[in-house]
Amino acid sequence: MERENSTVVTEFILLGLTQSQQAQLLVFVLVLVFYLIILPGNLLIILTIRSDPGLTAPLYFFLGNLAFLDASYSFIVAPRMLVDFLSEKKIISYRGCITQLFFLHFLGAGEMFLLVVMAFDRYMAICHPLHYTTVMNPRICYALLLALWLGGFTHSIVQVALILHLPFCGPNQLDNFFCDVPQVIKLACTDTFVVELLMVSNSGLLTLLCFLGLLASYAVILYRVKGHTSEGKHKALSTCTTHIIIVFLMFGPAIFIYTRPFRAFPADKVVSLFHTVIFPLMNPVIYTLRNQEVKASMRRLLSRHMFLVCNINLNQYNNLCL
């Protein structure tokens, strides 16, 4: 009896995104190109915001943290996924699977809470501009940042704790390209109805409530800016539109995956691919493309860098000639 209640599975076999070699090669090339192009863009956003003293407003502080979270999130699945594409047998240890699952939900929930904080920041800036600097001072911003990290950790540790209490005695094939709650739970050697219900309540309900709350907050903001001047109205609409795009990109796939019973659907793997690899890298880039101040600062940073590189090369050439 004690043996039956213990975990005897020491590794999981990942079945991958697809069994077609041609499709695997195509996805490998697309993900690799996308990863190598967009990831440096996120790092450039962080460097720009950190190096420009003019980008000290709370909006840019949170945008830099969003880029950091998304860059970190992209390291959880994408690198191993690219390696597994080249491997005949895709194996991940039990501990590796639990670790991947922990960081996936830790950083994912942290980003979800960060979007809520950014919505609150925009609400205060647009609807209560006279109180904005008082409410969103540096001390409050750091407190909010600490709160969202703690919230992400709490959410993730609950997920992991529930899975660690499940017995895994075989089979050990995960029908996915990474470890996530829906697929791992299905391999447990026990009735998982109660655990699934708790997981849906923890991940699904939390995601749905945050999503609806964000939509409601932006609806209030858009309603309040109707009477503003044309310039202020345009800027507020541009900012809110960008945020709403990110909200749908972030929460749409999460709601599809976590707010229903853990039953397999044909679209699950494709949605998971966009949710874990594509969208996280795009989010900060979308923000930046709609923000004139950040774009101008990035151009100045790149211009200074190119100027320094040209001067160094010119000095080396002159020294060679002498």
Image (tube, grey):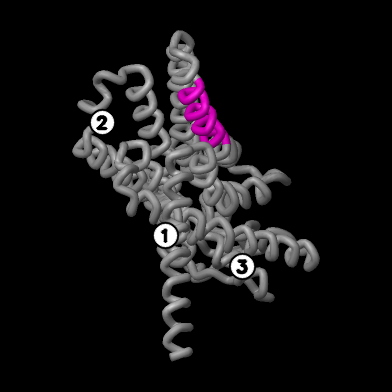
Residue 136 numbered mark, or none: 2
Looking at the rendered structure, the kind of residue marked 2 is: Met
Q: Identify whether 243 is placed above or below 84.
A: above
Q: Where's the C terminus, which quadrant?
A: bottom left
For mark 3, give the secondary structure.
Answer: helix
Q: Residues within 10 Å of mark 3 (few under 14, many from 20)?
A: some
For mark 2, give the secondary structure.
Answer: loop
Q: Give the CA separation, mark 1 to mark 2.
A: 32 Å
Determine if residue 197 is in view.
yes
- In-image side of 35 versus 213 (left or right): right
- Among numbered discs 1 and 3, the one appearing first in the sequence: 3
Nearer the observer: mark 1 or 3; the answer is: 1
- Residue at position x 50%, y 36% in the image: 204
Q: Which residues are magenta?
A: 234-248
- Among numbered discs 3 and 2, the one appearing first in the sequence: 3
Q: Which residue is mark 1?
A: 304
Residue at the farthest front position: 322
Q: Which residue is mark 3?
A: 82
